[in-house]
Amino acid sequence: MLLDALASIYVAPPNFEYEVFVIDNGSKDGSAEAVAREYPQVQLTANQGNTGYAEGNNQGIERAKGKYILLLNPDVILPKGGLERAVRFMEDRPNAGALGVRQVHPDGKLQRSVRGFPSPIAVWWELIGFTRLFPQNQEFGAYRMTWFNYDKVQEVDQPMGTFLLMRGDVVQQVGALDLAFPIFFNEVDWCLRCKRAGWKIYFTPDVEIIHYGGASTSQVGAAMAWESRRGLLGFYAKHYRAIWHLPLRVLIALLSFPYAWSQSRARREGKSL
């Protein structure tokens, strides 16, 4: 998948100067060696162990010299001309701090890749089932945004970090990914910091990528359910510390325990989530 992702860049490269970084987090399947052999022009960093998603991305961010920085997962296929269209979108909107794009499965089925910020009240509606009962209600579906229209340009809270085009000046202003969130919620935290700094985040359907989904996290299975819970609670500890948030935070912490347990069990048994 990594080699296919790189091929989708180099087979039809963008018409502007660019650089590509691959951060290999101690893989054991020959990925780093394959990149070095097939794409010697890539700036490859081969870590000895798994430093985590946030630190791995930061290694590339720190070395990047471009006006824009694209975080791109290795299980993605870019469309021809997609990078030009994404950059043009940002150039046309000087207030845009970041951009997410339309994502589809290999069979063309839409992936729901945009969410709202996971405020305690938004996650509370999710945990007690109101999101499923009222999927078109914008209050009850504020987190998963089950009502979101993926066919038009819109301002959003947090597009999935699978493809997140960030303005370099914004990264300089608000910082890179927070290492307190090594796997999950790092891009959510970054997007919140971006918007609090006065920048807008957009979604566009004019760039459509193929995303296989879960290619990395599936390798470590059940542990990801607990890591996701830890990330959420850490996100609350950082951004929702007011005294009036405390009751909901406690309830969510309690309810998220059985939820993470059921997710973990499903992963161990190989069931789809």
Image (cartoon, grey):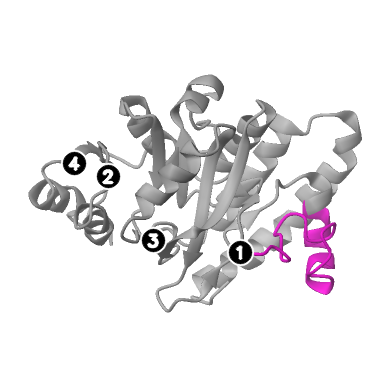
Tell us which disc is closer to us: 1 or 2.
1
Q: Quadrant of residue 191?
A: top right
Give the numbered dot on residue 26. Answer: 2
Residue type beneath disc 1: Tyr
Q: Give the number of callouts.
A: 4
Residue 227 is situated, as x and y percent measured from the top left of the image, at: 56, 49
Tell us which disc is closer to us: 2 or 4.
4
For label 1, the residue is 150
Secondary structure state at the residue bearing disc 4: loop
Q: Quadrant of residue 19?
A: top left
Local crowd size for mark 2, using a 10 Å CA cut-off: few (<14), some (14–19), many (≥20): some
Tell us which disc is closer to us: 1 or 3.
1
Mark toward the start of the polypeptide (1 vs 3): 1
Residue at (60, 41) in percent of width and height: 201
Residue numbers of the magenta segment: 123-149
Secondary structure state at the residue bearing disc 1: loop
Mark toward the start of the polypeptide (3 vs 2): 2
Residue at (18, 41) in percent of width and height: 42
Mark toward the start of the polypeptide (2 vs 4): 2
Mark toward the start of the polypeptide (1 vs 2): 2
Residue 66 is situated, as x and y percent measured from the top left of the image, at: 34, 30
